[in-house]
Image: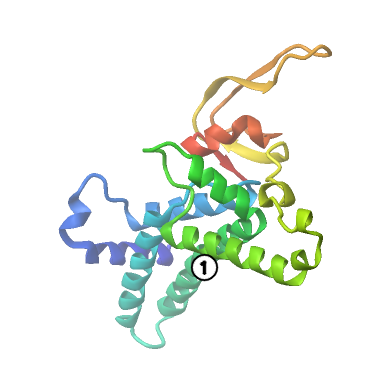
Amino acid sequence: MMADALLSEASDLSGDESQEEDVLTPAELISRLEEAWLNETFSPELLENRSELVECVMEQLTHMEENLQRVKKGDLKASVHRMEIDRIRFVLSSYLRCRLQKIEKFFPHVLEKEKSRADGDPSFLSPEEFAFAKEYLANTEMYLKSVALKHMPPNLQSVDMLKAVPEPCLDSFVFLRVKERQENILVEPETDDQREYVVDLEEGSQHLMRYRTIAPLVASGAVQLI
């Protein structure tokens, strides 16, 4: 495809770095972005931040824009390449917008989860998102105090944000595609009314399952939300 050709041309600008084993091709980079975008869009909770991926994609877009300048005016390839750049920008902006919307919706729980993570565990927020979440919390508390709480009796002039703001619903159902075969996935624990329900997930198969059940598989990349 012509769009792939532009991505290939952009990879030529990476120089010696393209020879390193851990460097993704431009096409693989965009594929990773699309995967992160779909997971974030369909996941009920905020996922681990992919700031390094975002930075790489933005750098790749710059290379693609530079290569587009080399295409002769009136060349059909220019319009095709421009559409591909616009498509990637849409995916990137949609991914970042989705994360900000989740931070605004679940901000106290997001901050608590970030605060309670163990040393060495991946951060759920980028430095910019963390600053945004803290500012959003401070502004919300200030607004509540100035508009409502200061008019309440003294014993009611405080609010627990963790209790006031609903948590993400991890028991919601999501569609997924299996990328790596998984065995003995616990779908439903044993109860007084039913036996334990365990399934094997075959590579390439698609399922509708409770998010809580497969959340670790989404984090590890074994399944893809669709």
Quadrant of the image occupied by residue 51: bottom left
> In the displayed structure, would residue 6 be above or below residue 20?
below
Front-lying residue, 4 or 95 = 95
Residue at horizontal 49 percent and vertical 60 percent from the top? 129
Front-lying residue, 186 or 183 = 186
User: Residue furthest toward the right?
Assistant: 193
Residue at horizontal 38 percent and vertical 88 percent from the top? 73
Residue 26, x across and y down, in percent = 35, 58
The color scheme shown is: rainbow
User: Residue furthest toward the front?
Assistant: 154
Front-lying residue, 155 or 58 = 155
User: In this figure, which residue is indicated by the disc labeled 1?
Assistant: 87
Residue at horizontal 50 percent and vertical 38 percent from the top? 219
Residue 134 in sight from this viewpoint: yes
Q: Amino acid at mark 1?
A: Arg
Residue 75, x across and y down, in percent = 40, 82
Residue 46 in sight from this viewpoint: no
Quadrant (top left, top right, bottom left, bottom right) of the N terminus: bottom left
Mark 1 crowdedness (10 Å alpha carbons): few <14, some 14-19, many ≥20: few
Residue 154, x across and y down, in percent = 77, 58
- Would residue 60 be found to the left or right of residue 46 on screen? left
Front-lying residue, 130 or 176 = 130
